[in-house]
Image (tube, rainbow, N blue to C red):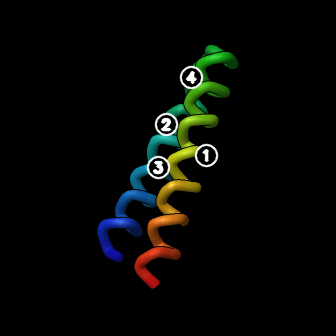
Amino acid sequence: MKILADALSALDDVERDSNRLRSKELREAIQKKIDEQREAIKALCRLYN
């Protein structure tokens, strides 16, 4: 479970860094991928509990 928590933390870091990008389209694309990854991690957490 620590690995999944670390993965969520890494996504938070990526999200923070991507907010600094000038391109709105790129920020939106990255945010979409981040949201998809968060959902996948949440699903894994449910499987392990």
Give the secondary structure at mark 1. Answer: helix
List the single residue furthest toward the bottom: 49
Residue type at numbered disc 4: Leu
Q: Residues within 10 Å of mark 2 (few under 14, many from 20)?
A: few
Q: Earlier in the sequence, mark 2 or mark 1?
A: 2
Q: Earlier in the sequence, mark 1 or mark 4?
A: 4
Q: Residues within 10 Å of mark 1 (few under 14, many from 20)?
A: few
Q: CA distance from mark 2 to mark 4?
A: 8 Å
Which mark is in front, 3 or 2?
Answer: 3
Q: Residue at x 55, y 42 (%)?
A: 34
Q: Check disc 4 and report the residue beneath it.
A: 21
x, y percent for residue 22 = 61, 17
Q: Residues within 10 Å of mark 4 (few under 14, many from 20)?
A: few
Where residue 11 is drawn, which disc sits there? 3
Q: Check disc 2 and report the residue beneath it.
A: 17
Q: CA distance from mark 1 to mark 4?
A: 17 Å
As displayed, is residue 16 above or below residue 4?
above
- Contact (CB < 8 A) between labels 2 and 4? no
Where residue 35 is drawn, which disc sits there? 1
The total number of labels drawn is 4
